[in-house]
Image: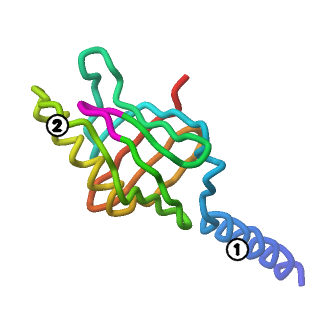
Amino acid sequence: MKKILPMALLALIVSGCHQHADSGLTAQQLAGQHFILQSVNGVAARSNQGQQPEIAFSDDLRLSGAICNRFFGQGELSGNVLTVKQLGSTRMICSDQQLSHWDSVVAETLSNGAQVTLERGNLTLKGGGHTLKYKAAQ
């Protein structure tokens, strides 16, 4: 009996944590948030002529951001998957090939649906073999 109670409590705690991890992210959690890109596929992000790569969400889940080019679109959140079906962007030539490639990575990840996590001000978008890590802007 002495061993059953602690084991039952442990099982309850673990199952409670599991349910929380599976609960979907809400649009309200992203609304009004602004994030600075920290890394793309493990490579540290850098600024483009003094401008930090970023992403921001409006109250109705419209998003905008920039790496080399600016991007924008209406986000849709289903569970923890963020999709922007009609992502628009500027089409300037970027002299930095890596930043230009990251423009494509962001577009592909958002257009195809990104698995989203938001923990302690850190936003992670994963999809299509890519991982984009952002930190809340100060």
Q: What residue type is labelled 2?
A: Ser
Number of other residues with Cα within 10 Å of mark 2, as a class: few under 14, some 14 to 19, many 20 or more = some
- Front residue of 37/63: it is 63
Dot 1 crowding, Cα within 10 Å, few <14, some 14–19, many 20+:
few
Circle 2: element type: helix
Residue 77 in the figure: left or right of residue 45: right
According to the image, label 2 marks what residue?
100
Was residue 58 drawn as part of the magenta stretch in this picture?
no
Whole-angstrom CA distance, mark 2 to mark 1, is 44 Å
Kindly give the residue lying farthest to the right in the view shown.
1
Q: Residue at x 46, y 43 (%)?
A: 63
The residue drawn where x is 57% and y is 36% is: 33
Label disc, if present, on residue 15 of the rendered structure: 1
Counting from the top left corner in percent of width and height, residue 94 is at 14, 29
Q: Give the range drawn in magenta.
A: 66-71
User: In the rendering, which numbered label is found on residue 136?
Assistant: none
